[in-house]
Amino acid sequence: MGFERFGTVSFTAQTKVDKFVDLLDEGKVAGTKCKSCGKTYFPPRADCSNCLSSDMEWFEISGPGKLISFSTLMYAPTGFEDDLPYTIALAQFGDVKIFGRMSKDLKEEDMKIGMDLQVVPVKLRGERVAYEFKKA
Ligand SMILES: [Zn+2]
């Protein structure tokens, strides 16, 4: 297996990421699901690591999910300092676990493990898009 093959895989992965961003623009947070074995992935993957199939389809993450854990950051990586403090969280939506940020609308004292959350697309400065968790 040479770099030609590696490049093809990278390109496929990039295409999936582009589609993910397109879906965010449409107001959807989506993962991929293997059509062969049914395993679901978030972040989306182009290939199934369970059965090695590349026959994947997109599915919208629909809530509510459950908050598994969260942590409020007082220090951030370079480029994110202006956003401090913010809370990162891990939530379970059906078969997939999603890692992301809590909405600034949600106060830390209102966050509880096991609470219902929705994951929603958000527009950031510039043309950037992302997603965040809101109270369901
Ligand atoms: Zn599979």
Image (cartoon, helix red, strand yellow):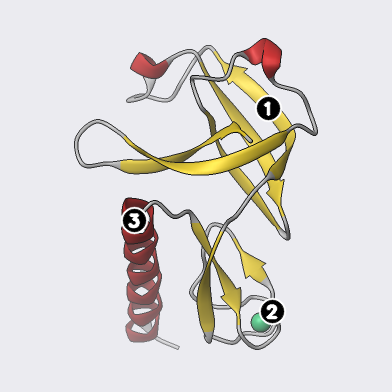
Instruction: Identify the secondary structure beneath mark 2.
Output: loop
Residue carrying label 1: 70
- As drawn, the residue found furthest toward the left would be 126
- Inter-mark Cα distance, 2 to 1: 29 Å
Q: Amino acid at mark 2?
A: Gly
Residue carrying label 2: 38
Q: Position of residue 60 (x, y in %)?
A: 53, 62
Q: Position of residue 5 (x, y in %)?
A: 38, 85
- As drawn, the residue found furthest toward the front would be 136
Distance from mark 2 CB to nearest ligand 1 atom below 8 Å: yes
- Label 3 vs 1, first from the N-terminus: 3
Q: Position of residue 127 (x, y in %)?
A: 21, 42
Q: Position of residue 37 (x, y in %)?
A: 71, 84
Instruction: Identify the secondary structure beneath mark 1.
Output: strand
Image quadrant, ligand 1:
bottom right
Answer with the quarter of the image where residue 65 lies.
top right
Quadrant in which the N terminus appears: bottom left
The residue nearer to you, when weighing 81 against 118, is: 118
User: Is residue 12 placed above or below 118 in the rendered structure?
Assistant: below
Mark 3 burial class by Cα count in 10 Å: few <14, some 14-19, many 20+: few
- Inter-mark Cα distance, 3 to 1: 27 Å
- Inter-mark Cα distance, 3 to 2: 25 Å
